[in-house]
Amino acid sequence: EVQLMETGGGLVQPGGSLRLSCVASRFTFTSYWMCWVRQVPGKGLVWVSRINPDGSFTSYADSVKGRFTISRDNAKNTLYLQMNSLRAEDTAVYYCVGGSGNYYPFDVWGQGILVTVSS
Amino acid sequence: EVVMTQSPATLSVSPGERATLSCRASQSVSINLAWYQQKPGQAPRLLIYDASTRVTGIPARFSGSGSGTEFTLTISSLQSEDFALYFCQQYNHWPTYTFGQGTKLEIK
């Protein structure tokens, strides 16, 4: 079964930093466009960032641009999200997700990891 | 940014009946529209893509239709495991993928 496993979440103070990791298994990670999507508990889904298969192209939602950095290590089948200058409004469950290309939906999802920004 | 609007926010239906969920895009997304199901404490699961194509293993009682700006997810003869939260998502205007706010399908 296809699997994505996120780690690195937790409680952080406003202004702090956190790095999420997502390890992929049982699918061709190196061919997938990978994203981070977040969800405030009980609310909707919001796309955060995207990276192409070789890591040369990244995109960000305006709400995180300049603060978050997405990256990947294809040798380790791992996706990352470096989150800096965290704000209370960044509190959410973060999902690592993947799709086969530009005009493809997200057919692979991690189980999600909670990030709480609070003093 | 393409805004996706789902209706209704909550839909109460009895088991065995049909449920019809709607999703509207603020501009055309062609057929690049997906439906996801999310149960409490779980990640969303892809049900339908390209507006009407079921993912392998998804029961035939789930069907999608529409193109452009108007889309529908129909679940015929609701089973107990179908009561969940449903999201639509456009992937036509990437990389800014956008989701609807969700429809909660609850037991009547």
Image (spheres, rainbow, N blue to C red):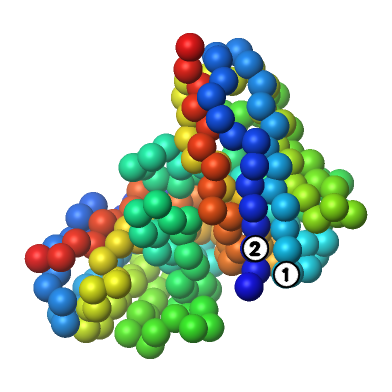
Amino acid type of the residue tagged 2 in the rendering: Gln
| Closer-to-camera residue (A61/B107) | B107
Q: Where is residue B15, by image quadrant?
A: bottom left
Q: Please give the chain letter of the residue carrying mark 2.
A: A
Q: Which amino acid, by three-letter code, is at mark 1?
A: Arg
Q: Which residue is mark 1?
A: A26
Q: Secondary structure at mark 2?
A: strand
- Residue A1 visible, this angle: yes
Using the image, tell me which numbered label, if any, was put on residue B81. none
Say whether disc 1 or disc 2 marks the residue closer to the N-terminus: 2
Disc 1 versus disc 2: distance between alpha carbons? 6 Å
Task: Say if mark 1 contacts mark 2, CB within 8 Å.
Answer: yes
Q: Is residue B15 left or right of residue A58?
A: left
Label 2 crowding class (10 Å Cα cut-off): few <14, some 14-19, many 20+? some
Residue bearing the label numbered 2? A3
x and y, in percent, of residue A89 in the image: 47, 24
User: Going 46% across and 42% down the picture, which residue do you hit?
Assistant: A39
Residue B100 showing in the rendered view: no
